[in-house]
Amino acid sequence: MNEFPQILTIAGSDSDGSAGMQADLHTFFIRKVYGMSVLVAAVAGNSYGIHAAETLPLAFIEKQFEVLADDFKIRASKTGMLSDADLIDTVVAAYQKYDFGPLVVDPVITTKHGAQLLADSAFQALKTKLLPLAEVATPNFFEAQLLTGRTIDSEDEQRRAAYDIKKLGVKNVVVKGWHNQTDQDEVADYVLLADGRDFWLRHQFFNTTHINGTGDTLSAAIAAELGKGKEVAEAIEIGHDVTMTAIEHEIAVGHQFGPINHWASENI
Ligand code: PXL
């Protein structure tokens, strides 16, 4: 009873289904784990962008944690958009109160199209309260620059950024490479593990506008695999393959910045 892998996303809803909680749940489904969710915020988004956002009452967020803890055996969790400092404080307190397994933190700060998803005043809370709880953190290139104050213009700097982020208390770090240059044919993500081992994950650059939800998918897939009991390095490699395959086989949804295709990752 209650043994099927249950994985939790603590995130915001994106109404168009391409990112946020919906991308997490698509990923959990395709990785064959049972997805649960603590909703903290919601955006009115479509393929053109984000048009409005709301946060949920803190007491209601706490209640979601409480009722899940009362019943389920959650084996791993991930955070997505936690747009202000109160949300971060509430999530940090709940995560410390209950046992929801290892935590993957996707330090969501902005979308790839420049929409800000984290209040400036919440940046310190992200850095000093949430990231130190992370078993794995998955900043993209832009978030890694903001978190470290570095200009990441080389693989050496990308590697140094991962060491800096580890110093914040993150156990395992994935610093994703830059991927928005049209003359680029490869993207390299850097992985620094808790025990000091490190490696690069290289993949072909796909020139597509359908990349909504890539960070959500990577972090959700890592959480899913950790929840199944995989070692961190393997969970990260699987997460990377899942995300890249989903980007490679885009689906025709929306007019501008569309979603990735989780079905394409079914057999990984
Ligand atoms: O992909 C980052 C992200 C996370 N969470 C929500 C979002 C987005 C991007 O649009 O809307 C709710």
Image (tube, rainbow, N blue to C red):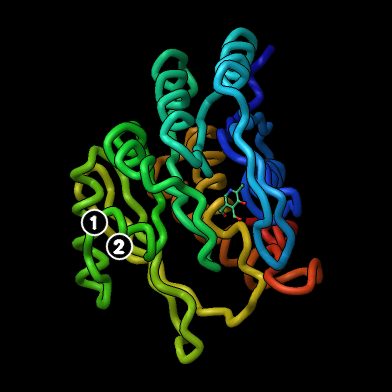
Identify the residue at horizontal 22%, vertical 60% (top origin).
149
Around disc 2, counting alpha carbons within 10 Å, would you say few (fewer than 14), some (14 to 19), or many (20 or more)?
Answer: some
Quarter the C terminus occupies: bottom right
Identify the residue at horizontal 26%, vertical 77% (top origin).
153
Residue 38 lies in quadrant:
top right
**x, y percent for residue 157:** 21, 69
Residue tagged 2:
145
Identify the residue at horizontal 59%, vertical 82% (top origin).
207
Around disc 1, counting alpha carbons within 10 Å, would you say few (fewer than 14), some (14 to 19), or many (20 or more)?
Answer: some
Q: Are marks 2 and 1 in contact (CB under 8 Å)?
A: yes
Badge 2 marks a residue whose secondary structure is helix
Q: Is residue 258 left or right of residue 75?
A: right
Residue type at the position of mark 2 = Gln
Q: Which mark is residue 148?
A: 1
Residue type at the position of mark 1 = Thr
* Alpha carbon separation for disc pair 2 and 1: 5 Å
Q: Nearer the viewer, residue 215 or 198?
A: 215
Q: Is residue 167 left or right of residue 66?
A: left
